[in-house]
Amino acid sequence: MTKHLFAKVAAVAMIIAGSLLGAGVSYAQNRAISGTVVDASGAPVMGAAVVVVGNASIGAVTDENGTFRLNVPAGANINVSCIGYADQTVAVGNQSVFNFVLQEDAEFLEETVVIGYGVQKKSDLTGAVASVRAEDLKDRSTTDAAAALQGKAAGVQILNYSGAPGSGAAIRVRGYSSNSGSIGPLLIVDGLQVDNIQYLDPSMIESMEVLKDAASAAIYGAQAGNGVVLITTKTGASDGGTAHITYNGRFFMQSLGKKGELFDAQEYIDYQKYIGNITDEELTANGWNMSKANNWYDTVFAPSWSMQHGVTFQGGNNKGHFYLSLNYLDNDGIVVGKRDVYHRLSAQINADYNLFKWFNISTSNSFEKWDRSAVSEGSYGSMLNSVTALDPLTPAYYSRLEDTPSTMQQHVALGDPVPTDPNHNNDYYGTSVYVQEATGNPLFQRDRTESSNGGINIRGNIAANLMPIKGLTITSRFGYRIAQSSSHSYNKPYWLTAMAQSSAYSISGNFNQSYYYQWENFANYNRTFGKHSIGAMVGMSYIENNSDNASISATASEEDGGLLKGDAPNFRYIDFILSDVPKSASNSPSRSANLSYFGRLTYSFDNRYSIQANFRADAFDSSKLSKQARWGYFPSVSVGWTISNESFIKDNIGQDALNFLKIRASWGRNGNVAALSSYQYSTTITLNNAVYQFTPSTGNGTMYYGSAPSGTANPDLKWETAEQWDAGLDARFLNNRLTFGFDWYRKVTKDMLISVPSVTELGIGNMWVNAGNVLNTGLEFELGWKDTIGDFRYSINANLSTLHNEVLSMPENKPFLTGGGVSGLNNKIISRFETGYPIWYFYGYKYVGVNAEGQAQYLNAEGNTVTDVTDNDMQYIGKPIPNLTYGLTISLAWKGFDFSIFGTGVSGNDIACFLYSADRPKSNTLNHFWRNSWGNPSVDKATAKYPDMNKVASDWKFWSSSAAIFDGSFFKIKQIQLGYTLPAKISKKALISDLRFFVSLDDYFTFATYPGTDPETATQTGSSAMGFDAGSYPTTKKLVLGVNLTF
Amino acid sequence: MKKLYIPLFIAIAALFSSCNQDLLEIEQKGVTSIESFYGTEEGAEAALAAAYDGFCSNVASRGPAFIYSPYRALFNNCGDDMYAAGSNWGDNDYMAALDEFRYDSGCEVVTNMYKGFYSAIYKCNLVISYFQDGIDGNQTAVTKRCVAEARVLRAWMHMMLAIGWGCPPLVDQLFTADVMPYNCDAEENDNPMTHEQLLEWCAKECEDAVPDLTERSSTGDKDGAVKVTKGFANAVAGKAYLFAGKYNEAKTALKKVIDSGKYALVPGNRFWENFHVEGDCNEEKVFEANFEFNASWGSWSSGGYMYHTTWMEANIWNWRSDHFVLAPQAVYDGGQDGWGGLGVPKYFADEFLANDGPDSYRFNTTLINIEDAVYGMEYGMADIDNMTRAEKEASKEIGIKDVNDGLYGQSFYLPFKQMVRATDANPTWGGNHRLNNYIIMRYAEVLLMYAEACAQTSDASGLQYLQAIQNRAGSKHVSSSLTLDEVKKEKKYEMWLEGCRWADLVRWGDTDKVKQAGQAVPSLYDKLFRAPQAGDQNIIWQHGSEANSRFYTVDTHVAKDKGFEVGFKAGKHERFPYPYDAISNNPHLAQNPQWNDPVAE
């Protein structure tokens, strides 16, 4: 197989070399032939070599339309070859136009799939591996590799906690497995473990493999319990070795997508009057008229332009390949001003070279420089929370002091630092006379802190492959990561409202650096003896991570003599802190390490029966586990049966009906070590972390330090363990036009790490134990269709996965855990982690409707409908995890035009809407409740959905009930893209081999019933706060204009 | 030749893997082992400092995972001398649920106080268990003193647990993690104790500790006011005996405090100091948790200032300034505005004023008339401060502007004793971090308890101390004879908002007023902004009529209207419920009567 590959690559290389030398243009008795090369589905085959048999210097390579032109000697035979297809040879004869239909080469029927310390043909896979190829990613205009996976693979859910520039997406593979926040998959890029993949521009990616089942992931053992994502970046190998320079440019206009349905000024007034909070007298006294109405969405957000440029150089021959990609992103978010921006400059440099037939080396490296600034979101007091909470009667600015609220005037008179906006005519920030808001004004929150945050990351690896005997490859691979980042911030005293004020100056600087390395040595042996194919792999890995950080901060008030030697911007550095101001500083280098041995055996018989076994032994350092609990063992086994290769199928069913059918099953065990943190298993005395002041004094009190045990020890602590069964089916029908994949899995995560409280009266705090099980089970479907009708090509790919998530058991003395809730918003809905329910479900009062008096009615713990409930009546009222996740991609191409539409959605999940606080009934909120409430003049009382707002506007229980839970299902058209590729004959004149323009609408259309902002980002970060909407940065909709240019 | 690579490779791999188990050994930073730590006098001092820290963090300050000091919230809000007020009904509901007796065993304040006490007791037990036999069997002055201080702190907490919950578990030693203690009266205990016996145990612990404790050196000794001394131990013993009904024993213990001469009432003109930073460690303080600024402190980290200030007390109990046109207290409190969570019942203010008279230092420190607040306090704005009284009375530039709720939960006197003054907070940490010390025992309480114990035993010798309190207060009423009623009234005024009233009225059975809780909560309105409306219930004008008054109150009962059961229920509310969390963690814990927990499925 390898020999064939080289032959084909060589054929193309010869042709290129020939044309570069000007050869092949002047043969005397030549005759011109032309034609097209297409595959079985009718799609053009680009890069196929068409050569004269016996004289390989005469040949051509097909272009992107699959066409070729060639002058051939009379009587010649021509051969068409292309990687992945069976060769064809025909005599030229008198024919001048040739249309080749290449059949896929059985050996190349499918691409190989990266499976961890090796590759495997997709047809031989016995585990559940989702593979996303460069073709699937190339038109995605997202800038984050994780986000590019969204909707592309069944069983893989992408979570966008925020639409802010530079906020990365999170990946969940097959559900939610733990009470810890660390339930993302292990991320491996070109063999290197990385902590995120946000730095990778999707255009640099050759393939992404998601090892979903435990058997596939088991080769990564203790860290693979939440799946593994393997990413391979591009090499210069594509296009048969042709050298290319590619430029990709994108300009995107971002704007606010789905807005929350808030009260406008008039409706706000009507509502507040109805609930008795505002009178006409008060409005008159405050000088209100409708011209002052303010829509905070319009005030805070405005469309902004961002851009991205990428240049790629790639080339190669049969000795080696080279790939260099440079990428620059300048993303300015939609908050007015430049306070939400993300810049990323990245480079990927990959190279490999065959030094000898038995030895090659390769390296891949990435460089990333980033900086980011962000506005606060998702919590009480955050800028984005106040966008929805501030009333629409309050202006963004006051230009005259006498127009400001009287309390602001009072504090100006008292000499307090009431801020003004230097970029807005030095106007006072508008604050409400109606609502006491923690932020005062979102624009001020935007401007309040001067901060910068950025860093550099270098990641890469170097590998050497030794191939001493046939079938054996010994690999030694060294991977590294070096990261440096710093952040600075400065805050000044201010007085905006009674709730939004500070009398302190503060400054801080943080510096982090880390280096990481992994050294892996492994050997693969693969041989085929007749009908028997065997494979074996054995290896070891050592990983060490070192980090160091320093942080300095200081806080002081004017009354204490101030903080800095000067107030001008050029003094706002740690260097200029007044010498008598105490600084707090921190520094503590840390190291972690782990050591692993692993192996794999594969055997297949006659391409029909396959079996694979994986094993890994992992040991983690003493900061995570005690010496006696250090080692863990992770086995797995999987089997496959390719039914389509059985003679009773082959002989009876034609290729145009069934091309491929395989069933497979697997079992495996993995771990989740990320939930372990430093020395949880031990109890020691934390020295001098308690303080009392035995000697009263003024000024800085004298500290007497005390010490106490850190908790209660559990030396047997170990990682969480996941065991998973998987059964699946892969099939292709109708000349490979129809593809179908199916998987069922059942994954039980055991030995969950839970911090169990001691009996309250013992007062000794919590102890970590391994207890509690979580089940994730589901079905995954993938369906694809591709076909060609004349010049028209199209394909449809759909995937869908179901998820049933349930906590199976919890320890007896910790029957449930309580998680999120949003502090400060005075809502009693919290998340709970409890046996018999999905993880982190919403726990609150069960609202069941309104009675004839307009009162809210609830279901109490006994199941009776009552108008009053106590805390003991709180119950399950919803869950943030969807039952269904799906994606749909449709691609069409006709001549030079291409069009694609891609959407993704979830259903069955709920959102707990915290965009209201019952103790601040004058805050703005969704108009949804009022518009459907008993007592609203335009609502029929008999069918009203919600109670009389007069009765519940300040009632915590109503707002902490299922009335505040909304269906979080959505379907979002992530992208609609139209592209046009200039005909080659035009572009070639400018030495351009490929020129494509496109326009794309990204995240433009969202279908959802949630009346709040974007249901996708209506959440807080972290699993226990999933689905809590306290005002987050919504996904922006983007109009993208782009160009792809290849020389 | 090539085949040599295989053994070579294996050799390298073997070499690499043979040494690297040691690479997995990483020493933990900043810690030491338990064995070595508890073996020295320095260890005893450090363990004791951790016990005080635990006391600050869990009892005097914010408590576990709770924003307000649970001690103040729990032991004051159920009393008949305050309302849990706020912007409107539903605001500050943590406290309002207690105030209206519609809380349950999930109540955060109850839960956090209970957890807080036992967390702090554990820190005391670390000192006691590791050092009660000294170091290697040898007791030293240091180990004895450290153990004694920890025992008294622990006794005070068990006493407050007994007062709050009746028969809570006695945790008098370090238990292993598998122990599940029983209520102190459960027969499964080796020595079951009734409620009274638990209180007596607390008293005896204090008495036993006294010989090993230091004595406050003089009334000017500040250090002696912020740690456990003989004086505090005797005061706690006295209080525990008093609550156990052992009046003679109470007298004996409390008399020791009086006779020590190390404590005195501050003069009347300095009465206010007791509640502000100026009065920290003064002659009247028997024990208070010392809160001080230190610029090096972090906020939330262990031992951070969040755990050594009363965070958010200023917010919760300062006046609701946004319901005023201008904040009357802005100059007084340095701009620290509040949520108005504390209200004063009209009957209480009227009775207090009638008793003390308008010139009483005590009354004027404790409460302030709404007119004195709006017209009398400095605004810091010349055009308003320079107005005449008559101009102010007619001005809409000041006053209560909120038309819906006015000042919810307030009558004509606003609470003043608790109001943060500008000096009580350090500006660097912000005004919501109150830094004046957290009073656990004030000498006035000692005198009043002594007077009560005398009254209960018909011993007239206590009268002088009751009179001393009254004279110092500048009250126009000075008792001529010692009766229990005289003591009760005096203690109600003197100790307002200091965690005494609720426990006393349960003990005395004076629960008539709290049975009415939630039936009529006043809102205070300003007629210039809101005229009385049809449907207003029980309109009361400050000076009798609309013509001569600007301010009036209207009663509401929102909770009742919503169908809540409100008000004190005899046989149930005398004791707090054991928290749901504690009950579900400890099957040995029996719930107090009538507190029905959800059936554990």
Image (tube, rainbow, N blue to C red):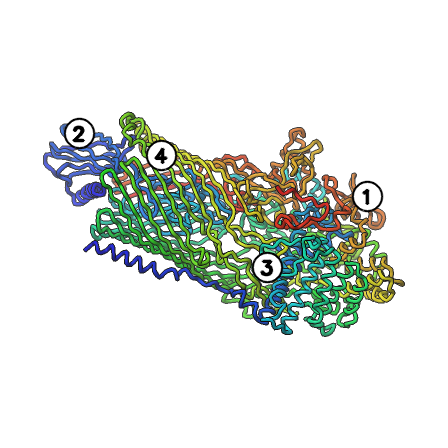
Chain hosting mark 2: A
Quadrant where the C terminus of chain A lies?
Answer: top left
Discs 2 and 1 lie in a common subunit: no
Image point (17%, 33%), residue name: A89
Distance from Cα at disc 4 to Cα at disc 3: 67 Å
Mark linked to residue A845: none
Quadrant where the N terminus of chain A lies?
Answer: top left
Q: Is residue B374 visible?
A: no
Distance from Cα at disc 2 to Cα at disc 1: 107 Å
- Amino acid at the residue labelled 3: Pro
Q: Check disc 1 and report the residue beneath it.
A: B538
Q: Residue furthest right?
A: B480
Q: Check disc 3 and report the residue beneath it.
A: A493
Between B55 and A9, which is closer to the camera in this rendering? B55
Discs 1 and 3 lie in a common subunit: no
Q: Is residue A538 above or below residue A97?
A: below
- Amino acid at the residue labelled 1: Asn
Chain hosting mark 4: A
Tag 1 secondary structure:
strand
- Amino acid at the residue labelled 4: Ile
Mark linked to residue A663: 4
Between A894 and A184, which is closer to the camera in this rendering? A184
Discs 2 and 4 lie in a common subunit: yes
For the residues labelled 1 and 4, say whether their Cβ atoms are less than 8 Å apart. Answer: no
Q: Check disc 2 and report the residue beneath it.
A: A96
Disc on the earlier residue, 3 or 2: 2
| Between marks 1 and 4 in the image, the one whose residue lies nearer the viewer | 4
Distance from Cα at disc 1 to Cα at disc 4: 80 Å
Tag 4 secondary structure:
strand
- Amino acid at the residue labelled 2: Ser
